[in-house]
Amino acid sequence: MMAERTVDSLLWSEMSSPLGRLLLVAGSDGLRRILLPDPGGPVGPEACWHRDDEQLAAARGQLEEYFAGARQRFDLPLAPRGTPFQLAVLNALAEIPFGVTRTYGEIARRLGQPTASRAVGAANGRNPLAIVLPCHRVIGSDGSLTGYAGGLAAKRWLLRHEGVAIPEGQPSLFG
């Protein structure tokens, strides 16, 4: 007899932010995704997700506090998915303090893989929990802003919000 398989139901909620509308997604194990506004068009929930504003109220509240300048660290159950390397990169992102930037190379060295800066960049680009796991705090080795899922304007806004000086007209490979 085959064991019955249960599918983890995903819950979603949305909120307004200075970056635009954010879509929050959680499973029974915690927050799984924060979808930023897509410069290419609107992002919506998948048909199999269930709206539950109450279950995601704490995540919305902490993000609102962050945007209001009243929160620098998040205290939420997180449940990102990824390979062991991607999860190691996400853990490294969680250690970057508010208002501080790191380079892809610095993160690679902290992971004991000094030649893996491109792999760190790829894992950073797949971060499902933007803002809470602050991939916006990762910059190029020359100080340039590199790609960001919500667009470079959002990355600039987040860094400036945290007090990081960003020169106007900042060059970027992905700008």
Image: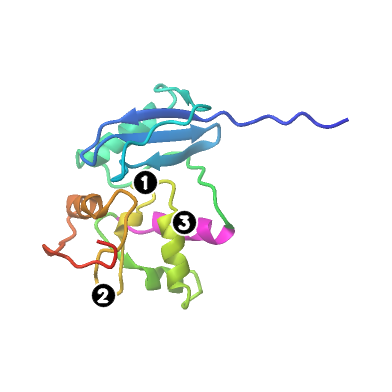
Asked which quadrant contains residue 17, the reply is: top left
Position of residue 73 measured from the top left corner of the image (x, y, whole percent)? 33, 46
**Quadrant location of residue 102?**
bottom left
Give me the residue at 13% from left, 65% from top: 167
Q: Earlier in the sequence, mark 2 or mark 1?
A: 1
Secondary structure at badge 3 equals helix
Residue 152 versus residue 85: which sits nearer the camera? 152
Q: Which mark is residue 132?
A: 1
Q: Give the mark nearest the N terminus, 3 or 2.
A: 3
Q: Disc 2 designates what residue?
A: 142
- Give coordinates of residue 92: x percent, y percent: 44, 60
The residue at which mark 3 appears reads as: 91
Say which element carries label 2.
Answer: loop
* Nearer-the-camera pick, 170 or 101: 170
Q: Which callout, 1 or 3, points at the residue further toward the start of the chain? A: 3
Which residue shows up at 48% across the image and 34% down it? Answer: 26
Front-lying residue, 62 or 173: 173
Q: Are marks 3 and 2 in contact (CB under 8 Å)?
A: no
Please identify the quadrant where the N terminus is shown: top right
Residue 81: x %, y % from top left: 54, 47
Task: Residue 164: say if magenta.
Answer: no
Residue 109 sits in which quadrant? Answer: bottom left
Looking at the rendering, the stretch of residues picked out in magenta corresponds to: 84-97
Tell me which secondary structure the magenta stretch mostly adopts: helix
User: Is 88 in the magenta?
Assistant: yes
Identify which amino acid the numbered label 2 is placed on: Asp
Q: Secondary structure at mark 1?
A: loop
Q: Is residue 26 visible?
A: yes
